[in-house]
Amino acid sequence: MKHKFGKVILSVFAALTFLLISGPVVFAAEAIPTGDSYIKVIFAAAAMLGAGVAIGLGAIGAGAGIGNAANGACQAVGRNPGVQGKIMTVMLVGMAMAESVAIYALVVALILLYANPYMRFFLG
């Protein structure tokens, strides 16, 4: 019974995913460029993909760093509650440094999307 229910849920999920993905593809057929503008489309898509990868990896790195800092601070305060103020200060500085990685990744993503320095090389 449980196995049969899982198959039904998977089938429904697959059908909904197919419907959500296929709709925009059908309506985008009218917007397909002709001639030299294929290069512009490929360049724009690559820039969007690069920006997404940059911010995604930057956010993962920042999240791991902040989580590691909070874990270490919680363990240190648990072992020695008397130095909570000093540990808190050092932890917040460490978290700010880890968060700066995500900010740098955001800057790189925004540069790729809006002020791409490689555009003149590829698009002339």
Image (tube, helix red, strand yellow):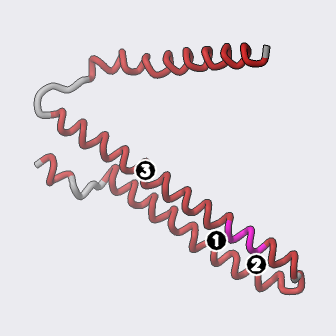
Asked if 44 appears above or below 61 in the picture, the reply is: above
Q: CA distance from mark 2 to mark 1?
A: 10 Å
Asked if 81 appears above or below 20 in the picture, the reply is: below
- Looking at the rendering, the stretch of residues picked out in magenta corresponds to 68-73
Dominant SS in magenta = helix
Element at label 3: helix
User: Pointer 3: residues within 10 angstroms few (<14), some, or many (20+)?
Assistant: some
Q: Is residue 54 left or right of residue 5?
A: left
Residue 90 at what x, y percent from top left? 69, 81
**Residue at point 27% right, 54% down?**
116
Q: Which residue is mark 2?
A: 88
Q: Earlier in the sequence, mark 3 or mark 1?
A: 3
- Which numbered marker is on residue 53? 3
Q: Is residue 42 highlighted in magenta?
A: no
Element at label 2: helix
**Residue at point 89% right, 81% down?**
81
Q: CA distance from mark 3 to mark 1?
A: 22 Å
Disc 2 to disc 3: CB gap under 8 Å? no
Element at label 1: helix
- Which numbered marker is on residue 95? 1
The one nearer the camera, 55 or 65, is 65
Asked if 106 appears above or below 87 in the picture, the reply is: above
Q: Earlier in the sequence, mark 2 or mark 1?
A: 2
Q: Which mark's residue is nearer the viewer, 3 or 1? A: 3
Q: Is residue 38 left or right of residue 47?
A: left
User: Pointer 1: residues within 10 angstroms few (<14), some, or many (20+)?
Assistant: some
Residue type at tag 2: Met
Residue 108 at what x, y percent from top left? 38, 59
Residue type at tag 1: Met
